[in-house]
Amino acid sequence: MPLACNELDRCSALICDIVQSKVLRIVTQVDKKEARQIAAAVYTEVRAFCDMELAKLQGPRDPVLRQIEGIIAELFRLDPADLRVDSRTWPKPAARGMMFLLLHETGCSAKRCGEMGGVTSRTIKYRIKAIRDEMETSPELVGIYKTAKTRLRSHE
């Protein structure tokens, strides 16, 4: 008998939590500095992979990202799931860029934004620059940005 969708999500989350805890335990038990650094890097990769896979299933686990995703999806008239996939069909690239810009402005590093969005930090920096450049010529994007910032402040 196949699992229902929400049961599958819980199972996936549990599996990821178990894997992350086991890798973290290995990191703390390793004696040599070089081996500990390698184990810590593996833990970071496992965590990023789990976050990305779970985000595909159930949306982001990070509450700030979930909030920003919801606001941006509403303002661009998209489904939040549309922001989790890379697409070149407008307005999805602008929406993802705006989402990463707002997330970055909340204090999230480009590396962490990339981990949560399933892209590299270089891509995050590029998208942030691209959306800022686009906002210089688009009053509509500036309006969306200001509205999103206001909504984020009101939720703090």
Image: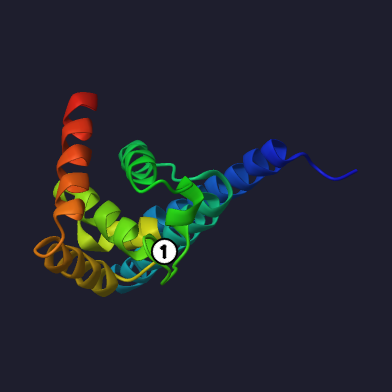
Which residue is at 21% across, 49% downward? Answer: 102
Label 1 crowd (10 A; few <14 / some 14-19 / many >=20): many
Q: Tell me if residue 51 can be seen.
A: yes
Q: Estimate the x, y position of residue 147 in percent, counting from the top left.
A: 19, 38
Q: Estimate the x, y position of residue 89 in percent, counting from the top left.
A: 43, 69
Quadrant in which the N terminus appears: top right
In the displayed structure, does residue 102 sit left or right of residue 67? Answer: left
Mark 1 residue element: loop
Q: Estimate the x, y position of residue 136 in percent, counting from the top left.
A: 8, 63
Q: Which one is in front, 106 or 101?
A: 101
Residue 63 falls in image quadrant: top left
Residue at the farthest left position: 136
Quadrant in which the C terminus appears: top left
The figure's colour scheme reads: rainbow
Amino acid beneath label 1:
Gly
Location of mark 1 (residue):
118
Which residue is at 48% across, 55% downward? Answer: 82
Which residue is at 70% across, 43% downward? Answer: 8
Examine the rendered structure and indicate whether residue 153 appears above or below residue 145.
Answer: above
Q: Which one is in front, 96 or 1?
A: 96
Residue at the farthest right position: 1
Q: Tell me if residue 31 can be seen.
A: no
Q: How many marks?
A: 1
